[in-house]
Amino acid sequence: MPGIDECLLDVMRLPGARGAAVVDWTSGLALGTIGDSPNGDHEATAAETAEVARMAAEQPAFALGSPQPPPATADGKGVTGTGSPVEDVIVTTRSGYHILRFVETAFDSSVFLHLWLDRAEGNLALARIRLGETAERLVLA
């Protein structure tokens, strides 16, 4: 299973990919980055996108109508992962797309993949599908 660097390399193979990062939305820290950053500073971009991810993940309005979390595991310890009903957040600008894809993990994490995609060269639907596949394969140690 690939780690952060391998996943970021895969994401950058998407047509129109400008830059990508794995970000912890509780701290706003970039756990890994590749390519360009919209404002020229990967750390600042990580902090800014973490605010957007946090706001989306914590809003009760997005939880309405969402399926209930799965039942407790066989050992009775409960389910794992973030439990957020939000799968991803897409922000469109005149020149590009920012896709924030939440990563489910076996521990109580709050990590997401951020892809900056050029609007003229990228394919939003393909990028969203591939980012979801990458998030499923991502191994955080």
Image (cartoon, rainbow, N blue to C red):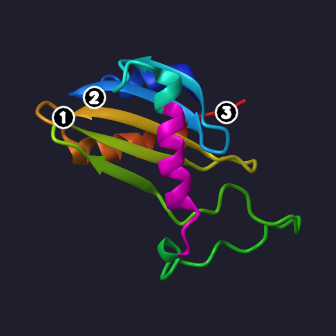
Span colored in magenta: 46-60
Q: Quadrant of residue 16?
A: top left
Disc 3 designates what residue? 140
SS label for mark 1: loop
Q: Which residue shows up at 60% across the image and 43% down it? A: 25
Left or right, 70 with reference to 138 = right
Q: Is residue 59 magenta?
A: yes
Q: Nearest the camera: 57 or 107?
A: 57
Q: Which residue shows up at 47% across the image and 50% down it? A: 52
Between disc 3 and disc 1, the foreground one is: 1
Q: Quadrant of the C terminus?
A: top right
Q: Amino acid at mark 1?
A: Gly
Q: Which residue shows up at 72% across the image and 74% down it? A: 71
Q: Nearest the camera: 60 or 16?
A: 60
Disc 2 designates what residue? 14
Looking at the image, tell me whether mark 3 or mark 1 is earlier in sequence order: 1
Disc 1 designates what residue? 122
Q: Nearest the camera: 20 or 141?
A: 20
Q: Estimate the x, y position of residue 61 in percent, counting from the top left.
A: 49, 76
Q: Quadrant of residue 39?
A: top left
Looking at the image, tell me whether mark 3 or mark 2 is earlier in sequence order: 2
SS label for mark 2: loop
